[in-house]
Image (cartoon, grey):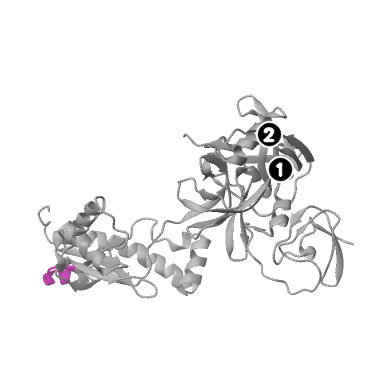
């Protein structure tokens, strides 16, 4: 059945010739001859060109693996070249091949496993170290395939992970309860000499992103995510108030459990926020044309006449212009005040979805008239009042520059309106445009937002 607020919104919007935007549900070959593989064999074209690596890749390697710039570049070169050498050795060794891996800070050491010690000469000639093992890779892969097939016929949540590990020459089964691994292995009929069981404390879980414009579900209804937000260590998203009431559970676009409404107001205002569970991650993106990510870098309010685009789970990405701010709309349930009127089209299910101007978040879809075939008018609940009302911080793509340590009344995370006055680093400033202040970006560094008073 339709959610209570969704039904109410349908009736409400019809009172002003408009429609509700919440959507109801319905909707083994012979071994090849031995071959000597030279260590000087050329790398695969392009793969070893670490000079062409994206700066973000090198930055992450330095940060997460504790590497210098040269070590990061050397690691990328070594990994690419090792992959090509390992491939040639696999072709040369045939069924005797038992896997390969790199090791060392710069991945300078390639080790290739074989079931036949006489392959050592070939492996060393290719610039790799040799590990002689009992089981060939094909036997391990066959055992894993048995587990894969069996897992389709039984629950394996307590033995949730299994994989071929060439370094231990086993199929490794990770289990939160060892007995569960035994049940799976017995049912699959796997040779125990091939298997290693490892006890683990946690089960893996699916991880999903929160993105503006994507669908979420409330009971039998569907709405759209507005913008990702955080509240201390909590994360979630803002959306329309008529989509749900405080306490209502939500599921994501994929029907996976997502979170619950923490606060909701409708009518009077049309705003709500949903706290997501640990399976979901807040992102600074809105779903744009063709599903591409559009970055959100702030929440500076656009002027009347400015362009604005909307993302929703029914009609996707559409653009128009801002017609008026501070618009009151009388629904059957009562009047909603402070909405922004636009020429962007929308249809049922787009409720709560994102409005963005450039990279600046504007608001969440409330209601409208017309459709995306003939055109129409829509109204959105501005985002800054939502952030202010519920004490939320917009998730943005701008890096957190940290606290400046400069004294004053200006504060990151606070929503400011035009005309508001603050002090910062011994000077007074007056706000030029409504926005939520971002950490490390004080008035002196934001001349488009602040003017010396």
- Horizontal arrangement in the rendering, residue 356 relative to residue 125 (left or right): right
Does residue 127 appear in this view? no
- Horizontal arrangement in the rendering, residue 259 relative to residue 31 (left or right): right
- Other-residue count near label 2 (Cα within 10 Å), few / some / many at <14 / 14–19 / ≥20: many
Q: Is residue 229 above or below residue 118?
A: above
| Residue placed under numbered mark 1 in the picture | 267
Residue occupying the far top of the picture = 374
> Could you say where residue 166 lies in the image, as x and y percent from the top left?
24, 67
- Horizontal arrangement in the rendering, residue 303 relative to residue 359 (left or right): right
Question: Are the residues tagged 1 and 2 within 8 Å (C-beta)?
Answer: yes
Q: Is residue 248 above or below residue 38?
A: above
Identified at 19% across, 55% down, the residue is 146
Does residue 196 appear in this view? yes
CA–CA distance in space, label 1 to label 2: 10 Å
User: For the magenta stretch, what is the residue range?
Assistant: 114-122
Identified at 22% across, 53% down, the residue is 150
């Amino acid at each position: 059945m339709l959610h209570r607020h969704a039904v109410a919104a349908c009736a409400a919007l019809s009172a002003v010739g408009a429609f509700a935007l919440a959507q109801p549900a319905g909707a083994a070959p012979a071994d090849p001859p031995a071959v000597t593989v030279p260590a000087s064999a050329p790398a695969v074209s392009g793969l070893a060109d670490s000079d062409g690596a994206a700066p973000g890749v090198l930055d992450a390697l330095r940060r997460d693996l504790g590497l210098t710039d040269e070590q990061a570049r050397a690691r990328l070169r070594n990994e690419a070249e090792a992959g090509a050498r390992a491939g040639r050795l696999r072709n040369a060794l045939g069924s005797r091949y038992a896997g390969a891996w790199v090791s060392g800070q710069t991945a300078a050491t390639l080790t290739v496993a074989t079931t036949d010690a006489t392959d050592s000469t070939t492996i060393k000639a290719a610039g790799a170290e040799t590990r002689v093992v009992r089981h060939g890779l094909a036997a391990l892969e066959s055992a894993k395939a048995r587990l894969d097939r069996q897992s389709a016929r039984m629950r394996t949540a307590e033995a949730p992970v299994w994989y071929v590990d060439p370094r231990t020459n086993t199929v490794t089964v990770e289990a939160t309860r060892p007995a569960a691994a035994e049940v799976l292995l017995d049912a699959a009929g796997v040779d125990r000499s091939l298997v290693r069981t490892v006890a683990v404390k946690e089960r893996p879980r699916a991880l999903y992103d929160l993105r503006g414009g994507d669908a979420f579900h409330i009971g039998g209804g569907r709405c759209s995510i507005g913008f990702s937000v955080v509240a201390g260590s909590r994360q979630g998203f803002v959306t329309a108030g008529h989509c749900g009431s405080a306490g209502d559970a939500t599921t994501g676009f994929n029907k996976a459990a997502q979170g619950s409404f923490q606060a909701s107001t409708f009518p009077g205002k049309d705003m709500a926020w949903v706290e997501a569970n640990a399976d979901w991650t807040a992102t600074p993106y809105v779903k744009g044309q063709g599903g591409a990510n559009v970055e959100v870098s702030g929440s500076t309010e656009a002027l009347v006449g400015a362009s604005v685009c909307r993302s929703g789970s029914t009609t996707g990405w559409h653009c128009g212009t801002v017609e008026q701010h501070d618009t009151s709309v009388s629904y059957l349930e009562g009047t909603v005040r402070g909405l922004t009127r636009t020429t962007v089209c929308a249809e049922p299910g787009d409720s709560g979805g994102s409005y963005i101007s450039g990279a600046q978040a504007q608001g969440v879809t409330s209601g409208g008239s017309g459709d995306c075939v003939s055109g129409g008018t829509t109204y959105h609940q501005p985002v800054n009042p939502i952030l202010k009302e519920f004490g939320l911080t917009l998730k943005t793509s701008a890096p957190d520059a940290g606290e400046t340590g400069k004294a004053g009344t200006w504060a990151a995370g606070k929503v400011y309106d035009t005309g508001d006055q603050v002090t910062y680093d011994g000077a007074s400033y007056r706000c030029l445009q409504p926005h939520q202040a971002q950490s490390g970006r004080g008035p002196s560094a934001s001349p488009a937002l602040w003017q010396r008073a």
